[in-house]
Image: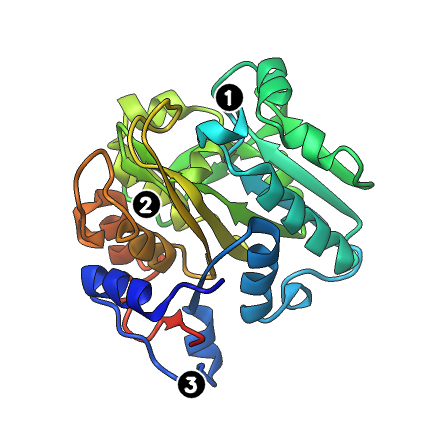
Amino acid sequence: MELTRREMLKIMAATGAVALWPKWATDAHAARRIVAYKGEQAATVRKVVEELGGIKKFIAKGDKVVIKPNMGFAVPPLRSSNTDPIVIRTLAELVLEAGAKSVQILDNPVHPIAMCKLRNGIAKELEDLDDVYIDLVKDEKFFADVAIPHGRKLKRTRVLRAILEADAVINAPMAKSHGGSIVSFSLKNWMGAIKNRIEWHRDINLHQAIADFATYIKPKFTILDATRALTTGGPGGPGEIKHLQTIIGGLDQVAIDSFAVGLATWNGKSYQPADIPHIKLAAEQGVGSMDLSGLITLTV
C-alpha cells in the first residue's frame, strides 16, 4: 500500500518537506521529483517507476543497461546488507520489457566474489531471466581511469568499464547505516563502482570523495530499497533492521537521500539532511537539492 498521509507528514516534518497536489506539469519539476510508496517489493518498484514516467522514458529498445545495486556482502537477504534480490529482479524485468538488449547487474564487492554469489541470493533470484548477467568484479582490467572535472578533492578515479560503456545506468542502493559515512543510500552506493576504495577513506575525506564522484556519475534514475533498512551495524551488519517496507524513486539522488534520512534513526541518532556531510556537499556542488519542498508525490 502507499505510505499513509500520517506517515508521510511525519517524515516531511522531520525533513522540512511540503507535499504539493496535483503532480507537477513541467520538466524542471519532474527532474527533481521523488516518489515514495510502501508495500510488497515487486509491485511497489513497478508503481514507483510508473509514477516517474514509466520505464520506456528511460530505457530504449536495444540499450545495454547496467543496474548498480549493493551486492558486495556475502550475507543472506534478511541480513539487509545488500539490495533485496526481488527489487533487483523487478528492475531487470522492467528493463527487458522496455526492449533492452542486455542487463548487467554489476558491483565491485567488499567480500570474496564466490561467497557473495553463493550467499546474497541475487544470482538464484535472477537465474531464469535471459539476457541478464550478474557480474561481481575486482580485477584491474575491468576498470578505466576517468577524470572528475568538477571534483574538489577527487580529480581522477578508476571506474567500472561496463558503466562507462552502458547506454543506461540505474542506481539501486540499499538503505543502511555506515560507520564512515553515517548512512549509505544513493550517493554512497557508487563506491561499488570504483576500484580504489582505500584512497577515498585514507587519502581523501570520504564525504568529499562521495560528493565529488556524484558530480560525474549520471544514472537514468535511482530506486532506493528501504524495505528492510539496516539502521545499525552497517554497511555489513549484523545490526538492527527496521521494516520500513518503502521504495523511493527519483532522478535527484540528493533529494532521495535527504528524504531517506528522515525515515529512521541511524546508529541510534536522528539526523537532518544537512547533518550528513556528503549529502550537504553534493547539494553545494550542484548534484541535487536537499530542499524537499514540493518534491514528494503523494496519492491519497
Between 289 and 198, the one nearer to me in the picture: 289
Residue furthest right in the image = 130
Task: Report the residue at 25% width, 68% height from top.
Answer: 17
| Residue on which the image places disc 2 | 211
Task: Report the residue at 51% width, 38% height from top.
Answer: 83
Q: Which mark is residue 22?
A: 3
Depth check, mark 2 against mark 1: the one in front is 1
| Residue on which the image places disc 1 | 75
Tell me the amino acid under the disc marked 1. Answer: Val
What separation in Å lies between label 2 and label 1 (alpha carbons)? 28 Å
Q: Report how many numbered discs are placed on residues in the image.
A: 3
Between 137 and 186, the one nearer to me in the picture: 186
- Asked if labels 2 and 3 touch by Cβ distance under 8 angstroms, the answer is no
Tell me the amino acid under the disc marked 2. Answer: Ala
Query: How dense is the environment of label 3, judged by Cα within 10 Å: few (below 14), some, or many (20 and up)?
Result: few
Task: Report the residue at 63% width, 14% height from top.
Answer: 114
* Label 1: which secondary element: loop
Task: Report the residue at 27% width, 40% height from top.
Answer: 208
Which mark is first along the chain, 2 or 3? Answer: 3
Query: How dense is the environment of label 2, judged by Cα within 10 Å: few (below 14), some, or many (20 and up)?
Result: many
* Label 3: which secondary element: loop
Image check: 39 left or right of 113?
Answer: left
What separation in Å lies between label 3 and label 1 (alpha carbons)? 42 Å
What separation in Å lies between label 3 and label 2 (alpha carbons)? 32 Å
* 92 in relation to 28, above or below: above
Which quadrant of the figure contains the C terminus? bottom left
Which mark is first along the chain, 1 or 2? Answer: 1
Q: Position of residue 204 (x, y in %)?
A: 27, 30
* 153 in relation to 247, above or below: above
Tell me the amino acid under the disc marked 3. Answer: Pro
